[in-house]
Amino acid sequence: MAQMKTILRALNGETQPVPPVWMMRQAGRYLPEYRATRARAGDFLTLCYTPDLAAEVTLQPIRRYGFDAAILFADILLIPDALGAEVGFVKGEGPKLSTVTTDADFARLGDAEGVHATLSPVYETLRILRGALPAETALIGFAGAPWTVATYMIAGHGTPDQGPAHRLKDENRALFDALMARLTEATIEYLSAQIEAGAEVVKLFDSWAGSLEGPDFAAYSLGPIRAITHALQQRHPGVPVIAFPRGTSRANYVTFAQETGVRAVAIDEHADADWAAQALQPLTCVQGNLAPGHMVTGGAPLVEEVRRIRRALSGGPHIFNLGHGITPDADPENVALMIETLRETA
Ligand code: CP3
């Protein structure tokens, strides 16, 4: 029987001598071959919705570096787009969407089952990838967690403190809850279809979980992620879910591991690896947590950090990754140095 893929082994709780590695935003603007394909596609959403090109950019970092997993090339804002939020990416300004702040705005959104019509090219990308990836490379699908996606839908763009989403939550709880419920259902639909198309693992990005506290964290980060994970387990038993509650507290990371049913918790670069080894690894696989800035600066500090994180998390299941996405100003040589350092025996 073929060896199980290294990422799947880590997600099954196995401690491995060299942890498997992939990188958030591994297909992206720091790679010249990405920029070339992106230029051919024209705009970003066209790239996401053109299966041949989306598959091509997904494969580029695999060819260049031999990562242990490929992550589907898409975006967390495709769900709002499929619900009718008119998403656009403006160069230099980031994403722009129509806002959801009134009952009338909400009434214009499509229902959860309707998302497949827009998202079917993404499923085709996954089918292409399943046929094109090396046998040892795992295929990761993903979606944004409902809270993070809602912050963009409510504001109509990215926000430093998620102020508009917090305001809607506090001023019109019924509408906010209805939006969260719609996003939760749509995400279950979307990830289920990704798994049917070939995703072997799925990841939920809750990039703005850090601004939710106390009961709000339980209700709007942990709760929806638990609901999605449980629904996926019913439909697709055994397919692991990774959650990334970025910026949350130590106590919340632990609660995530205990209560959501996810098989790995991804920690950002501010979480301490020694703490994670002691508090999280006995409960779940840990993914992370190299600071993305090292991919810009490189050198001895990068080498030292890779060794330190590997050593700290060597006693339990670990998937090596950055604490957040690689930035466009990163040097591709530093990515090679990271992998080479990680895979050295020592
Ligand atoms: O990780 C991967 O390689 C898979 C693809 C992926 C992208 N975005 C591609 C992308 C994934 C997993 C995402 C997730 C995503 N998208 C998140 C959550 C993770 C995180 O970083 O916190 C968020 C918040 C988004 C929303 C989004 N998409 C923003 C804020 C932006 C930035 C706008 C900009 O111009 O920097 C994007 C665009 C985006 N998504 C790019 C890529 C490669 C750059 C677009 C380009 O080529 O111009």
Image: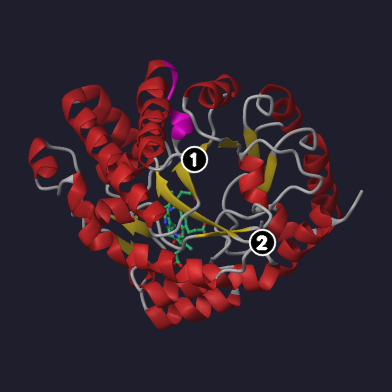
Residue at 90% in and 52% down: 345
Q: Nearer the viewer, residue 133 or 204?
A: 133
Majority SS type along the magenta span: helix
Q: Is residue 211 magenta?
A: yes
Percent of width and height locating residue 99: 21, 47
Pointer 1 or 2: first along the chain = 2
Q: Nearer the viewer, residue 274 or 63?
A: 63
Residue at 83% in and 39% down: 311
Percent of width and height locating residue 18: 79, 49
Q: Which mark is residue 28?
A: none
> What's the amino acid at mark 1?
Gly
Note whether 191 is above or below 227 in the view shown: below
Question: Over which residues does the magenta segment extend?
Answer: 209-214
Residue at 76% in and 36% down: 313
Q: Nearer the viewer, residue 316 or 78?
A: 316
The reply, left or right, for residue 305 in relation to residue 193 is right
Quadrant hosting residue 81: bottom left
Query: Mark 2: few, some, or many residues within 10 Å (few <14, many ≥20)?
Result: some
Which residue is label 2 attached to?
Answer: 67
Q: CA distance from mark 1 to mark 2?
A: 23 Å
The total of numbered circles placed on residues is 2
Answer yes or no: is residue 142 visible: yes
The reply, left or right, for residue 257 in relation to residue 332 is left
Answer yes or no: is residue 99 visible: no
Query: SS class of the residue under badge 1?
Result: loop
Q: How is the image coloured?
A: secondary structure
Query: SS class of the residue under badge 2?
Result: loop
Quadrant hosting residue 176: top left
The reply, left or right, for residue 235 in relation to residue 185 is right
Note whether 206 is above or below 277 in the view shown: below
Which residue is label 1 attached to?
Answer: 238
Percent of width and height locating residue 56: 50, 75
